[in-house]
Image (spheres, rainbow, N blue to C red):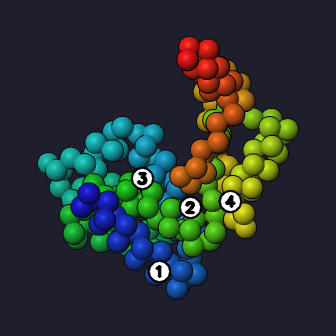
Amino acid sequence: MVGTRAAARYAKAILEISSEKGNADAINNDMILISQSISQSKELNIFLNNPIIKNEVKYNALLEVFASVNEGTKELFKLLNTNNRFELLNAIALEFQRQYNVLKGIEKVIVTTAVPMDAVLESKVLEKARALAPGKSISISNIVDSSILGGFILKIGDKQYNASIANQLQLLKRELTN
């Protein structure tokens, strides 16, 4: 997809510049804020993707909504205004985070559990994640999904470890029907 490649190029350029300036951590925090805000606000997403709204209006709105962000992030807004590419902002923010994590050696782990994780389960998950990604720093996100009944599903990179009760029941059902 063309938009994805463009977002990757913007993200790479921002990461290189922010690394040179020594503010990559601050820009990453801005990108987390931006991606969370866009994903949680349907109105903001529609606003940024609406071709009828003038770029200057989008630019000024972003400066107000994200007034606390770093100057480097505000420069991104300015560049997107100049290039008429505000629809890429969320993709750029997500891609920046991905590239930042690769640069810093951080492996993002998504854990789906039936109930919020307690300390015991978190230590088990962390142990499994370290085994799947040796030498990496681990960042855990917990998603609660009661449909898995118990256990957990661990996603790390392109690998998935499914230790859920629902999966075990499904495997048992397949064995019994064959």
Residue 167, position in %: x, y?
62, 26
Q: Name the residue under label 2.
A: 29
Tag 2: amino acid: Asn
Disc 2 element = helix
Disc 4 element = loop
- Answer with mark 4 or mark 1, whichever residue precedes in sequence: 1
Q: How crowded is mark 3: few (under 14 residues within 10 Å), some or many (20 or more)?
A: few
Picture quadrant of residue 169: top right
- Answer with mark 2 or mark 4, whichever residue precedes in sequence: 2
For this orientation, the residue located farthest to the right is: 120
Closer to the camera: disc 2 or disc 4? 4
- Answer with mark 3 or mark 4, whichever residue precedes in sequence: 3
Tag 3: amino acid: Val
Q: Are marks 2 and 1 in contact (CB under 8 Å)?
A: no
Q: Mark 3 points at which residue?
A: 65
Q: Residues within 10 Å of mark 1 (few under 14, many from 20)?
A: few
Closer to the camera: disc 4 or disc 1? 4
| Closer to us: 29 or 15 | 15
- Answer with mark 3 or mark 1, whichever residue precedes in sequence: 1
Residue 29, position in %: x, y?
56, 61
| Closer to us: 175 or 113 | 175
Residue 130, position in %: x, y?
74, 56
Quadrant where the N terminus sits is bottom left
Is residue 111 left or right of 77 when viewed as pictured? right
Closer to the camera: disc 3 or disc 1? 1
Q: Name the residue under label 1.
A: 16
Kindly tell me whether residue 128 is visible in this rendering: yes
Question: Which numbered tag is attached to residue 133?
Answer: 4
Closer to the camera: disc 3 or disc 4? 4
- Answer with mark 3 or mark 2, whichever residue precedes in sequence: 2
Using the numbered discs, state the Cα–Cα distance from disc 2 to disc 1 in whole angstroms: 16 Å
Which residue lies at the image location 45% right of the left edge and 40% below the top edge? Answer: 40
